[in-house]
Image (tube, grey):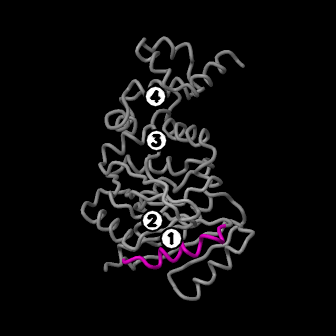
Amino acid sequence: MKLENKISVILPVYNSENYISESINSVLKQTYRNFELIVIDDGSTDNTIYECEQFLKIDKRVVLLKNSHKGLTATLNDGLKISSGKYIARQDADDISLPDRFEKQINWFLTNDKKVLCGTNCKIINDDYKYKSNRSISFKDYTIKNKLTYSNCFVHSSTMFLRKYAEKFGFYDENLKYAQDFDLWWKLSTVGIVGNLKDKLLIVRDRNNSVSRQNTNTQTLNFIKSCVKYYAFKKDIVDINENKEIDFYEKNILTRDKIILLQFLYNDKLDDKVMMKNLNFKQLIKLLNYPFLLLRKIFKILNI
């Protein structure tokens, strides 16, 4: 096994004493052995730290960071900053990776040096281990990039990505409390091939009080904010033809119509009257596909 193919597993945890041991064990039982496991506790007030410390005694690959309560995004970045692997694998404190997950993801990367991000399909269970559903998406690069324009199609804790590109983009954006994974997947999708394995290699607990189940509107808004920030508003008014990233975005992911609509709906620096004049009838009709942002824009125009 080549040393340069080392994986750094980033596992953020907060008050997960009932789940963390099973999650860590599922990582330590991987058939792919060249990894480090970085567990970052975000100020837990239960017995989570005690549970984690037991693994420090039995496996030198386990590293434990103890933080004050910074929030998920900063916690993830703390782990990333000390990671030493070529690849980064995500794992949540209440998820279970199947034994061959890392091996299959590494094998996917090794077939093409332009590959940058790989997720997997997963099985969803409840707290009683009862099956609820499967989460499956297309495995093709182009299909995934198209879907990323309106949905976070990856199961975030199933992903593995190249560290050097995540570092290039500053890791996770700490200005985003939610949907920070949306933001990073977007950036990674601009520099290489993304994919999703057909195999169900992760078991995800669907808990009503989990962060991913809450604040849906905020996550959606943050995703749109990410699109706008990185692909449509490098300048106050963007010349699409002069911007390489926007050119990629337009040709490979979004139509020009959608970019213009997002410009109108989200960028408060633009002159609304000028933008309205530039919208044709077809584009105006398409505004109805964005009811939340359209309502926000109407309130702004009316100074409500």
Crowding at dot 4, Cα within 10 Å, few <14 / some 14-19 / many 20+, comes out as some
Residue where numbered disc 2 is placed? 88
The residue beneath circle 1 is: 83
**Comparing labels 3 and 4, the label whose residue is closer to the camera:** 3
In whole angstroms, how far apart are the C-alphas of marks 2 and 4? Answer: 34 Å
Disc 2 marks a residue whose amino acid type is Ile
Q: Is residue 262 magenta?
A: no
Q: Amino acid at mark 3?
A: Ser
Badge 3: how crowded within 10 Å, few (<14), some, or many (20+)? some
Q: Position of residue 129 (x, y in %)?
A: 53, 65
Precedes in sequence: disc 4 or disc 1 = 1
Q: Nearer the viewer, mark 3 or mark 1?
A: 3
Which residue is denoted by mark 3 in the rendering? 151
Q: Which residue is mark 4?
A: 238
| Lower position in the chain sequence, tag 3 or tag 2 | 2
Q: Are marks 1 and 2 in contact (CB under 8 Å)?
A: yes
* Real-space CA distance between mark 4 and mark 1, rounded to the nearest whole angstrom: 37 Å
Above or below for 197 versus 30: above
Q: Residue 244: name its quadrant.
A: top left
Residue 189 location in percent, x, y? Answer: 38, 48
The residue sitting at 53% across, 75% down in the picture is 24
